[in-house]
Image (spheres, rainbow, N blue to C red):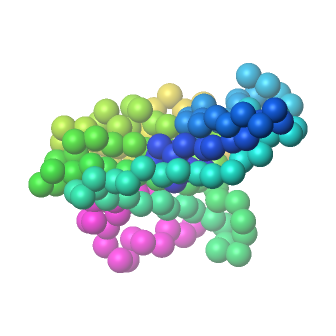
Amino acid sequence: AIPLLAYEATLHVIYKDGKERAIPLREFFLTPEQDVQREHILKRDDILTTITIPRLPQQAGSAYMNLKHKQSFDWPLVAATAVLHLDNGKVQDARVVLGSVAPVPIRSTTTEQVLIGNTVSDELATQAGHAATKGAVPLTANAYKVPLLAELVRRTVLKAAGQLSPAEEVMTL
């Protein structure tokens, strides 16, 4: 779901009464504050039929990265997707989505604001990583995720811009 949210995907659903509706993925997830018993807005008899992903502009780049204890485990410790609309290396628009750091994937508009209007560099990517963790309130047992996420976002931004070295493609503990 993390990349789909960054790509601004739309879900197409058929309801029990036969009516169809297009739902932007950003409206799909429910946080525990909204409903502690459900993770999404679908009802029992709703059927998800299609997911539509808009085509990216010619000069766009994207990347999804995650960090796991071992590659064999299903759930990442942290995950991130960056979609960058570039013009000669300068970010015209950005979407950064974080995963495995909250009950649902979250879009980091703070990180996006750091990127927009600037030329991608290692320094800018590092600033984006720090912005992604600004205001983070980790639980007692998972504070270690904060620096991991900052580094993962740095690498994801660089990868989306085509600037990540192959040596940094894999992040290990």
Image side of residue 83 versus residue 27, left or right: left
Q: Position of residue 66 (x, y in %)?
A: 55, 61
Q: Is residue 137 above or below residue 130?
A: above
Residue furthest out toward the front: 18
Q: Is residue 144 above or below residue 168?
A: above
**In-front residue for pair 132/25:** 25
| Residue at image coords 31%, 50% | 84
Q: Is residue 15 visible from the viewing direction of this image?
A: yes
Q: Position of residue 123 (x, y in %)?
A: 24, 50
Q: Is residue 40 visible from the viewing direction of this image?
A: no
The overriding secondary structure of the stretch rendered in magenta is: helix
Image side of residue 7 versus residue 66, left or right: left
**In-front residue for pair 117/7:** 7
| Residue at image coords 73%, 41% | 14
| Residue at image coords 61%, 44% | 11
Membership of 167 in magenta stretch: yes
Q: Is residue 91 above or below residue 36?
A: below
Looking at the rendering, the stretch of residues picked out in magenta corresponds to: 148-173
| Residue at image coords 22%, 42% | 92
**In-front residue for pair 6/116:** 6
Membership of 166 in magenta stretch: yes
Query: Image quadrant for the C terminus?
Result: bottom right
Give the number of callouts: 0
Q: Position of residue 87 (x, y in %)?
A: 15, 50
Residue furthest out toward the left: 88
Image side of residue 161 versus residue 52, left or right: left
**In-front residue for pair 55/30:** 55
Q: Position of residue 19 (x, y in %)?
A: 72, 34
